[in-house]
Image (cartoon, grey):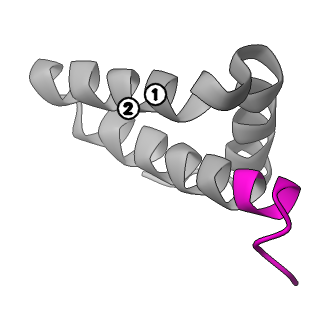
Amino acid sequence: MMFPEQELWASARYLLKIHGPRAPAFAASRIAALTEAGDDDGVMAWRMIADRIDLLQGAEDGKVRD
């Protein structure tokens, strides 16, 4: 399944806006629930979102440079 980059980044930004520093934990809980449900596509999508959350948080902290 394809996941458009723009949607993945938008999802990560939204989760950071809503959940702040708890966004990674929220994403992890979604990954766990989808893993338990056997939703491989959902797990893949949320892992990609979680990766982008980590990158965005690093950028906010000054750890990531383009």
- The disc labelled 1 sits on which kind of residue? Ala
Of 20 and 15, which appears nearest the observer? 20
Q: Secondary structure at mark 1?
A: helix
Of 51 and 9, which appears nearest the observer? 51
- The disc labelled 2 sits on which kind of residue? Ala
Q: Residue furthest bottom?
A: 66
Of 2 and 39, which appears nearest the observer? 39
Q: What residue is shown at x 76% (from left), y 54% (from top)?
A: 56
Left or right of 49: which side holds 63? right
Left or right of 2: which side holds 12? right
Residue 17 part of the magenta segment: no
- Residue 49 screen position, x and y as percent: 57, 45
- Residue 62 screen position, x and y as percent: 85, 67
Image mark for residue 54:
none
Q: Secondary structure at mark 2?
A: helix
Badge 2 density bin: few <14, some 14–19, many ≥20, Cα 10 Å: some
Q: What residue is shown at x 75% (from left), y 48% (from top)?
A: 9
Image mark for residue 28:
2
Badge 1 density bin: few <14, some 14–19, many ≥20, Cα 10 Å: few
The total of numbered circles placed on residues is: 2
Q: Which residue is mark 1?
A: 25
Pick the quarter of the image with the C terminus.
bottom right
- Residue 57 screen position, x and y as percent: 73, 51
Q: Which residues are magenta?
A: 57-66
Tags 1 and 2 in contact by the CB under 8 Å rule? yes
Q: What residue is shown at x 36% (from left), y 48% (from top)?
A: 44
- Residue 10 screen position, x and y as percent: 80, 39
